[in-house]
Image: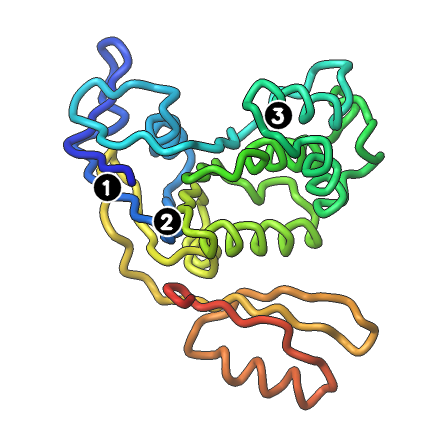
Amino acid sequence: MLLLRGIGKSYGRSAPVLTDVNLEIRPEQVVGVVGPNGSGKSTLLRILAGLSRPSAGTVTGSPLVGYVPDRFPAGTRMSALSYLRHLGRIGKVSDVDSKAPELLERLALEGGPRVPLRELSKGNAQKVALAQALLAEPELLVLDEPWSGLDPAAHAVLAQLITETRERGASVVFAEHRDDFARAHATEVFELSGGTLRESSGERYARIVLRNPGGQLVTSTVPLSRSDTVLLQALQRGWSVVRVHTPGAK
């Protein structure tokens, strides 16, 4: 699908942001890229999305990309629904009139689909960004810190959307600064440090979705070694198990 070889990125005479990055994105893969602020995660994702050209190396492949930046520019009077319909028509999404409101409803956009973009909080603007990235059912979904600012309910919806994207044969790459959180959602996790990308070797995690006796959904991220214990305790307390996702599982 997409292959990066020897990728480097520099700005002027400053130190390189990326150095000799090699990464292959395959179908049905969810890749988490972890690293602290300033480590180059956003730069790498912009190269993957085709929005920035590397200073060195090669990028092979041209999948249809859906991209969500780390901060969505939502300073317009246009409503969320009008914005999505406009982009969908530009992208020739034939069912945009039904798909756009469906995505906004699923993400529970505060204020409803006709709220002006400029009135949205960071988290709700992020929901609109996610909806626009998913409209055309991209082959590669690129997400820059997508959970930042989202409410807990939207966290669970985003996890479901990532799973659905993978299940239809597409791929997902996301940036995240929490290794355990990345491991709960990705099939493979890489660490970006000092401009160099390497496979992370930390402990694997599981994402568990439970329903409490009151009917509310609760999502927990736990070390894989403790997942059986957590599930047993939940069942003993009258909770039900909705879904258990472990890295690499179908």
**Quarter assignment of residue 16:** top left
Left/right of residue 123 with respect to residue 167 in the rendered view: right
Q: Which residue is mark 2?
A: 31
Quick one: 187 or 64, which is closer to the camera?
A: 64
Report, in whole angstroms, how far the alpha carbon at label 3 lies from the one at label 2: 26 Å
Q: Which residue is mark 1?
A: 23
Describe the colour scheme in one phrase.
Answer: rainbow
Q: Is residue 146 above or below residue 65?
A: below
Identified at 25% across, 35% down, the residue is: 194
Left/right of residue 101 with respect to residue 63 in the rendered view: right
Q: Which residue is mark 3?
A: 88
Circle 1 residues within 10 Å: few <14, some 14–19, many ≥20: some
Report, in whole angstroms, how far the alpha carbon at label 2 lies from the one at label 1: 10 Å
Lower sequence index among marks 3 and 1: 1
Lower sequence index among marks 2 and 1: 1
Point out the image quarter for the C terminus.
bottom left
Q: Nearer the viewer, mark 3 or mark 1?
A: 3
SS class, disc 3: helix
Q: Circles 2 and 1: CB distance less than 8 Å? A: yes
Identified at 70% across, 45% down, the residue is: 107
**Amino acid at the residue labelled 1:** Leu
Answer yes or no: is residue 38 visible. Answer: no
Q: Is residue 118 above or below residue 197?
A: above
SS class, disc 1: strand
Q: Position of residue 112 (x, y in %)?
A: 83, 35
Residue found at the very far front of the displayed protein: 94
